[in-house]
Amino acid sequence: MTDSPEPIERSLFEAPPMAEQERMVEAILFASTEPVTVADLEQRLPHGCDPAEALVHLRKRYEGRGVHLVRVGDAHAFRTAPDLGHLMRKETVEQRKLSRAAIETLAIIAYHQPVTRTEIEEIRGVAVSRGTVDQLLELEWIRLGRRRMTPGRPVTFVVTEQFLDHFGLESARDLPGLKELRAAGLLDSRPLPGSPSRGEDEDEASVGQSELFED
C-alpha cells in the first residue's frame, strides 16, 4: 500500500495566481471613489503581486463592455463606456457660471503647464485676480506645482487628475487643439487671451454639461 502524497503547502511569500490578482485589483477599483495608482495597488495587494500586469489583463477583459478601465494621469479607474454616457444623463442640467477670465486662465494652465501667475498674465494681457485662481483651486482642477528656480522662486500651476478625469483625458497631451475646439462649438470667434483691453469684470460664460468647462 502506497502512501498518498502529502498536500503541498503554499509559501506565505508566494504571489496568488494572476486571475486572483485581477479579481483583487478589480474589487479595489470598483470600491474606490477616486482613480487608483499602481503604487497604491502595490501597497494593498499581497507581497509579490504585479498590479501593472493585472491592469493590462483587466483592460482587455473590459473592452467592448458597458464599463471600461481607463487611465487618468498616473492612476486607473472604471468609467462608463463613452457611447453609453447618454443613459447616465439627468433630466435637469445644472448650469454653473465661470467668468471668461476663469475659463481663459484654466485653458492657459492646461496648455502651458507648468506656468506661473506672471506667465498667465503675460499671455492674457491682464492681471489675474486671486479670486479667479482660488475658484479653480476649490474646483480641484488646478494645483500648485514646483517652484521655478528663478529669482523669487515663483510657484507654478498645473492641472490635476480631477481635471483630466472630469473631461475624460488620459493626460494633458490629449487636450484638443484650438481648431478642434472651435469646430465642436467649444470656443467662439472672440479674440484669444492677450488683448490688453479686457479686464476681470467681463461677461460670464455659461458652463453646462455639454461644454468644455462643465460642472
Image (cartoon, grey):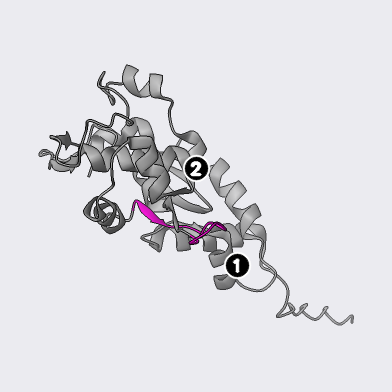
- Which residue is at a point 54% across and 44% down the rendered structure image? 59
Q: Nearer the viewer, residue 111 or 25?
A: 111
Please tell me whether residue 37 is drawn above or below residue 81 in the rendered image.
Answer: below
Which quadrant is home to the C terminus? top left
**Disc sitting over residue 42 in the figure:** 1
Q: Which residues are magenta?
A: 141-153
Residue 156 seen in the figure = yes
Q: 129 left or right of 155? A: left
Please tell me whether residue 84 is drawn above or below residue 121 in the rendered image.
Answer: above
- What's under tag 1, amino acid-wise? Glu
- What's under tag 2, amino acid-wise? Ser
- Asked whether residue 196 is drawn in magenta, I would say no
- Which residue is at a point 62% across and 73% down the rendered structure image? 46
- Which residue is at a point 45% across and 58% down the rendered structure image? 155
- Asked whether residue 145 is drawn in magenta, I would say yes
Residue 167 seen in the figure = no
Q: 213 left or right of 163? A: left
Label 2: state its secondary structure. Answer: loop
Q: Position of residue 32 (x, y in %)?
A: 40, 62
Q: Nearer the viewer, residue 24 or 114?
A: 114
User: In which image quadrant can residue 42 be found?
Assistant: bottom right
Label 2, residues with CA under 10 Å away: few <14, some 14-19, many ≥20: some
- Total labels: the figure holds 2
Mark 1 and mark 2 residues within 8 Å of each other at the beta carbon: no
**Disc sitting over residue 171 in the figure:** 2
Which quadrant is home to the N terminus? bottom right
